[in-house]
């Protein structure tokens, strides 16, 4: 069965620090990969997605993610975080089954 | 406004009561999903419907039933609510290629 693992459950950073959130999945075939963000009290919003092509994907709000097929990873990065990036971040995988499987989520707290 | 609409937004039930969560999408999407979100566990798939007339179990289907009423609507029913079903429930829909998933704003359910 597919599974998605996010290594960091709770991350605390100061403003302007760099961010990297890890995501690994367990599926050997072709996958679509997603990162979602959930701001406090809100629903999920898509940050970025990867289907094919350039493994370095750029999303909204300065986020990017790199797909490394050999490592089954899709890590999220941002060079300089802001207080407004405080949120929960979810990695998700769809292996063409139609089902989007989520990781456990990472809570990011950015201190001003 | 285009998107996924969930009702109600909040609900408190007593143990043993039943209720139906409603979801409707106006994007002509084929597939619809119900997830539950619990702290530290991410979003877990309860049921999904790949197309009108079909439904399938996800990761955590016990205690729930679903109905794909038509292409637009996908309801989730709790026949006999239990405290373990206290959660935030999200409905989502996707196009036929699963390239884009759109989430509703969620239903916060408390079972006492």
Image: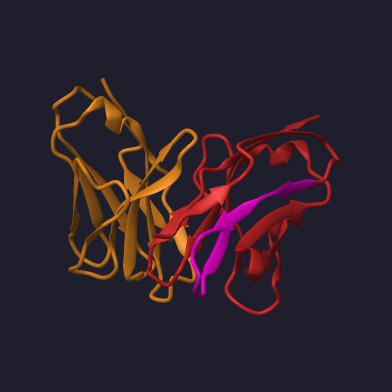
From the viewer's side, name the closer residue of B103 and B66: B66
Q: Nearer the viewer, residue B107 or A76?
A: A76
Question: At 75% from the left edge and 36% from the top edge, which residue is drawn?
Answer: A83
Supply the letter of whichever chain is red.
A
Q: Which residues are magenta?
A: A19-35
Locate residue A69: give its quadrant. Answer: bottom right
- Residue at 76% across, 56% down: A62
Q: Is A69 rendered above or below residue A90?
A: below
Which image quarter is the C terminus of chain B in? top left
In the rendered image, the vertical position of residue B105 relative to residue B25, given as above or below: above
Residue A67, position in %: x, y?
66, 66
Reply yes or no: does residue B32 show up in magenta. Answer: no
Residue occupying the far right of the picture: A16
Figure label count = 0
Q: Is residue A26 magenta?
A: yes
User: Hey, which residue is sitting farthest bottom in the picture?
Assistant: A53
Q: Please tell me whether residue B69 is drawn above or below residue A97 in the rendered image.
A: above
Q: Can the viewer see residue B1?
A: no
């Amino acid at each position: 069965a597919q599974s998605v693992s996010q290594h960091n459950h709770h991350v605390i950073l100061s403003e302007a620090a760099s961010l990297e959130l890890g995501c690994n999945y367990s599926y050997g075939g072709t996958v679509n990969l997603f990162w979602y963000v959930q701001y406090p009290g809100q629903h999920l919003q898509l940050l970025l997605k990867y289907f094919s092509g350039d493994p370095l994907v750029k999303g909204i709000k300065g986020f990017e993610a790199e797909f490394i097929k050999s490592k089954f990873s899709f890590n999220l990065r941002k060079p300089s975080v802001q207080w407004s990036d405080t949120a929960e971040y979810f990695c998700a995988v769809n292996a063409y089954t139609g089902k989007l499987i989520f990781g456990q989520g990472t809570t990011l707290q950015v201190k001003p | 406004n285009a998107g996924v609409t969930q009702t109600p937004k909040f609900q408190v039930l007593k143990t043993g009561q039943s209720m139906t969560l409603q979801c409707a999408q106006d994007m002509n999407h084929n597939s619809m999903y119900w997830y539950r979100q619990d702290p530290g566990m991410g979003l877990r798939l309860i049921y999904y419907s790949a197309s009108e007339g079909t439904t399938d179990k996800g990761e955590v289907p016990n205690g729930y039933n679903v109905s794909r009423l038509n292409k637009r609507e996908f309801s989730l029913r709790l026949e006999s609510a239990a405290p373990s079903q206290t959660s935030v429930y999200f409905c989502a829909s996707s196009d036929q290629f699963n390239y884009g998933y759109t989430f509703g704003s969620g239903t916060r359910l408390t079972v006492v």
